[in-house]
Amino acid sequence: MKSPTIAARRSRALLTGYFFGLGTVMAMWGARMPAIQQTAHLTTGQLTVVLLAAALGMVAGLQTAGRLAHLDRLPILISVGAVSLAGCLALLGQCRSLPTLLTTALAFGMAHGVLDVAVNSAAVQCQTAYGRPIMSSLHAAYSIGALGAAALAAVTARTGHSLLFLVTGLVLAGAFLALAPTARTLSGTDQPLAPVASRQCEAPPPRLTAGRVWLLGVLAAASLLGEGAAADWAAVHLHSLDASTAVSAAAFALYSGAMAIGRLAGDRLTAGFGSTTVIRAGAVLAAAGLTTGVVTSSTPVALAGWALFGLGLSITVPSLMTAAGAGGPRALATVAVIGYLGLLAGPALIGALAVVVTLSTALLLPALLAAAVAALAPRALEKP
């Protein structure tokens, strides 16, 4: 196998930084949500409207970036999206009223959407230049950034979120501005769209049919629904088993840690066995792990179940983004929009089901969807 060029290695390091920064910002925003609500004196309904504004902004950003993200525009979109996202985080910490929060959250969501499409599109091109799978490790940087930000938010719990958001946002914005000239040299952005030149990546051909794009999106939504379920319901599930507050919080930490570990190993597994095989095996593991975890009354087994769920789902989204990116930024944006709908709607759907049945029964939904991912992955990823 031909060794990657120096330019490709430099681009990989640069994209790793952008993924890390994206994970840091998003986790910081989510971890201090109660402080945002308290400072602005928001009711639960008003906070929901703020989150909806961020979600609508993200969808608009995803669609806009999908239309604008030609290969020669990716560096500028990445730089603008990254600096804007970090700047919006700094501004969110200074908002003290519902109108200012709504406006800033909308801009925050748009910047998130633009950066998400641009950085994943550039990652697909960098992977093509690299000649072997690297997407999973790039997404691992996102997970590691999110873990670090969550830990920082916990350690600084007694520090006002305004100062934390301001310092973090300004530091990241300065770093992204400093990287802007280097972003122009991202490897692969001057090359035509093509899948990775490797049998193991099993990427679909550049001309994706509408049906395959939608199928990739549905699988992404199924996977991201599971991520949303873990973020919002894992601790609640452990608490329902009479676990302590600390142990309950550990459920999502174990899930996130297992996902980061899986993504760090994902590229080697994909190179060795192929993305379809790895996704199917991981999805089966996720389904079995979560099912076991939610049907038990044992706290250790439940914790292990959430960890296996994160490990199993870890490679799914990077592989789906790789497949969609082979069809161009617009196809990737479509898959991202559909996928994030699952992330946003999933927790609410599980909550509604939990009202009708029990929470443990409602949490079988992500397990069933993981099983569906295992069944449908060959159709979505393998070449005809």
Image (cartoon, rainbow, N blue to C red):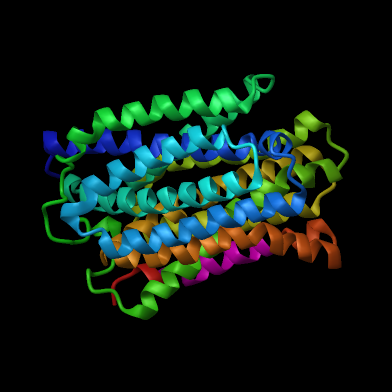
Q: Quadrant of residue 101?
A: top right
Residue 86 visible: yes
Q: How many discs mark residues in the rendered view?
A: 0
Residue that extends furthest to the right in the rendered view of this protein: 242
Q: Residue at x 47, y 33 (%)?
A: 145
Q: Quadrant of residue 377?
A: bottom left
The C terminus - image quarter:
bottom left
For the residue pair 27 and 199, the one nearer the viewer reads as: 27
Q: Is residue 374 left or right of residue 294?
A: left
Q: Residue at x 81, y 50 (%)?
A: 296
Q: Quadrant of residue 162?
A: top right
Q: Where does the image place residue 63, in percent across and percent down from the top left?
A: 38, 64
Q: Where does the image place residue 122, in percent across and percent down from the top left?
A: 25, 49
Q: Where does the image place residue 369, in percent across and percent down from the top left?
A: 60, 65
The N terminus - image quarter:
top left
Above or below, comparing residue 382 to residue 34 in the picture: below
Q: Where does the image place residue 378, in percent across and percent down from the top left?
A: 41, 70
Residue 364 visible: no
Which SS type dominates the magenta stretch?
Answer: helix
For the residue pair 372 and 285, the one nearer the viewer reads as: 372
Q: Residue at x 62, y 51 (%)?
A: 50
Q: Residue at x 76, y 50 (%)?
A: 44
Q: Is residue 59 left or right of residue 229?
A: left
Is-magenta flag for residue 335?
Answer: no
Is-magenta flag for residue 375?
Answer: yes
Above or below, comparing residue 302 to residue 157 in the picture: below
Give, as a single range, the part of the protein colored magenta.
Answer: 364-378
